[in-house]
Amino acid sequence: MTDDTRKPKGSDSAQKILEHAHRGLELMAEYQPATMGATQAFMRQAMKPGVLTKKQKELMALGMAIVLRCHYCIILHVRACKAVGVTLEEVMETCAVAIMMGGGPALTYTAEVERAANLVYLDEEGEPIR
């Protein structure tokens, strides 16, 4: 693949968003450990497989993150989607459902999904990670 056709790897801004999200979690854990502990326990429990699989729950969470326009949530859930075996095609179909529910504002947030997907679905040369 030539430099002219190389797909972009995740942008610096996508990495910075991820770093900011983690820093926010760290700050809450430092200043509000009991609250953060309870919040994280609730989140772990909610995301455990049950009637819905972990994959289904991550796709739902991503769709909601898009509709709610939370760029921190988008990067975290795109990364979690990749970790549980969600394909890029499934991510993009989830974007379509989110747009159907969230309208034009949700559509603009697919740019955030692209930044996140480039970060977690492509290797350093811009090739898909399998």
Image (cartoon, helix red, strand yellow):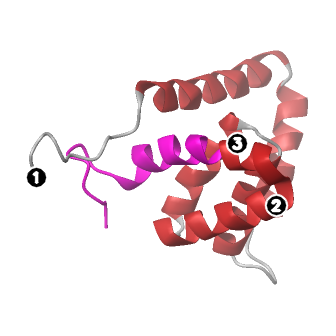
Task: Name which residue lies at 70% across and 56% down.
Answer: 62
Q: Which residue is at the far left? A: 2
Q: Which x, y percent locates residue 121?
A: 40, 55
Q: Which residue sits at x=32%, y=41%?
A: 8
Q: Which residues lie in the magenta part? A: 109-130
What is the distance, in whole Å, between disc 3 and disc 1 at their CAs? Answer: 32 Å
Amino acid residing under circle 2: Gln
Q: Is residue 75 magenta?
A: no
3 or 2: tag closer to the N-terminus: 2
Instruction: Using the rendered image of the protein, determine whether residue 87 is visible from the camera's viewpoint.
Output: no
Q: Residues within 10 Å of mark 2 (few under 14, many from 20)?
A: few
State if disc 2 and disc 3 touch (CB < 8 Å). no
Residue beneath label 1, please?
1
Query: In the structure shown, which secondary structural element does the residue marked by tag 1 occupy?
Result: loop
Q: Position of residue 60 (x, y in %)?
A: 75, 65
Label 3, residues with CA under 10 Å away: few <14, some 14-19, many ≥20: many
Mark 2 highlights which residue? 45
Q: Which residue is mark 3?
A: 73
Of callouts 2 and 1, the N-terminal one: 1
Q: Nearer the viewer, mark 3 or mark 1?
A: 1
Q: Name the quadrant of the C terminus.
A: bottom left
Reply above or below: 19 against 114: above
**Which of the 4 image quarters holds residue 76?**
top right
